[in-house]
Amino acid sequence: MQSWRGETARTDAGSMTAPAIRLTGLSKDFGPVHAVVDVDLQIDRGEVVALLGPNGAGKSTTIDLALGLSHPTAGTAQLFGGDPRAAIVDGRVGAMLQGGALLPDLTVAQTVALVASAHRAPLPVENALERAGILDLAARRVSKLSGGQLQRARFAVAVVSDPQLLILDEPTAAMDVESRRDFWLSMRQFTAEGRTVVFATHYLDEADFFADRIVILGAGRVVADGTPAEVKSVVSGRTIRFEVDSGDADAAAAMIPRLPGIRSHDRRTDRFTLVTDDSDRTLRALLTAVPSARDIEITAHSMDDAFLALTAEAVPLLTKAV
Amino acid sequence: MPYRYILLESLRQLRNVRSLAFTFVIPLVMLLIFGSLYGSSGQQEQRSGLPWLIVTTVQMASYGGMLAALSQAFAITTERSIGWNRQLRITPLSGVGYLVSKVAAALVVALCTIIVLCAVSIVVLGARMDALHWFTAILGIWIGVIPFALIAVALGQYARPSFAQPLFTVVFLGMAILGGLWIPLEVMPTWVISIAQTVPSYWLNKLGQIGANGAGNALLPIVILAAWTAALAALITWRYRRDAARA
């Protein structure tokens, strides 16, 4: 209800159908460092998108560029089909940024009220606090908040303009597991009303739990763009390493491609490396087919492995945007 | 202009008890000491014909107002270092709006300081002047404080948090001494007096004295203070544009 009142007042016909975010050929250099390299990305209204990537992948820079807080070296960033600043002035964008802190001397309610006073059609302060689930912290000073409470206070600040698009840069940093879960549950309520959410994280489980699309950034480029299931399949694979006696090596090499779940394999004389989607089934079959296999070692792919693989463009598993 | 934000921001700075104590206490103590020193005998300053107590009150109110305005520099450096204005960039508040809110807050805090110091002089030290002259004195001082509100913004823009304190000290000490806000300039060597006539605090004091006197040529102080204001506004705008272009 609340959101529709604002939306009809703010939206003009021309930008009614424009995507929430459109980045075109976006690049940003900091001196010799290419922080963001030729990023093309469109995020439609109502999408919940995770920007996933290790530190230094260009997540925060991309967010700054999308919000118009930083000038691109090349390319353009549009929000709702127009200049990012115009969307911000319209109150259609809320954000929790890296390095955007609150004033320690103010209470939570005073902080939200101060930011609200800068907006044209803000929500009532209590309403914003309620959405962030921190009505009980209204009178507490910002300096007295725990890490998780502080993030929620920043969330209240981000939603006080009743935005259609919410951009969150590592919103659950400094939260413990339970507050992270609570945070995402309260976010569900927010997106259930058809709003767009883009959040940066380096937790795959968080992206998987909450996003319906995951965009992976590596070294400033979009290296993968797909559903959580697609992305997880890159990460969920396991690696099986083993050795065989020299005499059995050729026979083993012939058997391996026929094992269940195998995605790729590699042989260095007597030593084999298999990448599998289902390590249990592969291993059972392997022990039957190659009884002399020994020194067996199974390792899970970490997110870092996936990033490395994707950013090196060695494994073009998700090819949508590579 | 984001009036609501400017209003809340000014009230916030007024509520900031710690910095207020800092800006009130020093000029207040000096007023009580110098005021009772010069004031009790009812002597008059020769040139303006004003009682010394009034001259001292105007000096200390000017000093207090200047200090209050300048101390807004700390608010800006602190907010910059913790990232508060980064947060504000996700609001309709423009960079200019932010700077205007700081100038407004500085002027509100300064006005309160000026009025309280004059009130103390009246109530505690028994300074007497008709209401119109108090009004013009306070108005004169307040107008004279405008360049200092801009100096505060410029300091806030240029100084890193670790460097803000020494820079602030140098600026306000220099301004207080050269403006004759602590010690009457008459006791200074002539070369100091000639330098003094270039700094805004000298003209701030002058404008206050003219206001208290209800007579004198206010045009020259106003022109010089306006020139300072324009120059500082240009400097601040230039710096702001450069920062924005670098982002």
Image: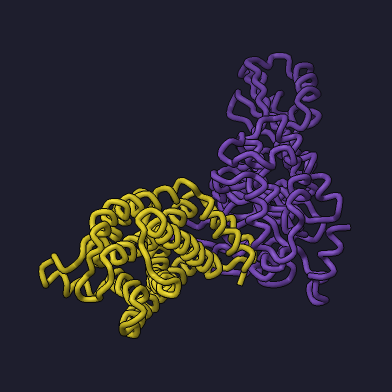
Q: Quadrant of the N terminus of chain B?
A: bottom right
Q: Quadrant of residue B48?
A: bottom left
- Residue A16 is left or right of residue A104, and the answer is right
Residue drawn 47% across and 65% down?
B107
Residue at horizontal 82 percent and vertical 44 percent from the top: A188
Q: Residue at x 74, y 60 (%)?
A: A122
**Is residue B94 in view from this perspective?**
yes
Q: Is residue A216 visible?
A: no
Q: Return the residue nearer the eye: B218 or A199.
A: B218
Q: Quadrant of residue B62?
A: bottom left
Chain that is coloured yellow in the picture: B
Picture coordinates of residue A291, whole percent (x, y): 73, 14
- In the image, taking residue B5 as reference, residue B16 lies left or right, namely left
Left or right, residue B117 beside residue A265: left
Colour setup of the view: by chain
Query: Looking at this view, is B35 or A15 the one in front?
Result: B35
Position of residue B156 measured from the top left corner of the image (x, y, whole percent):
41, 59
Q: Position of residue B151 (x, y in %)?
A: 37, 66
Looking at the picture, tell me which residue is in the foreground, B16 or A81: B16
Front residue of A60 and B176:
B176
Query: Which chain identifier belongs to the purple chain?
Result: A
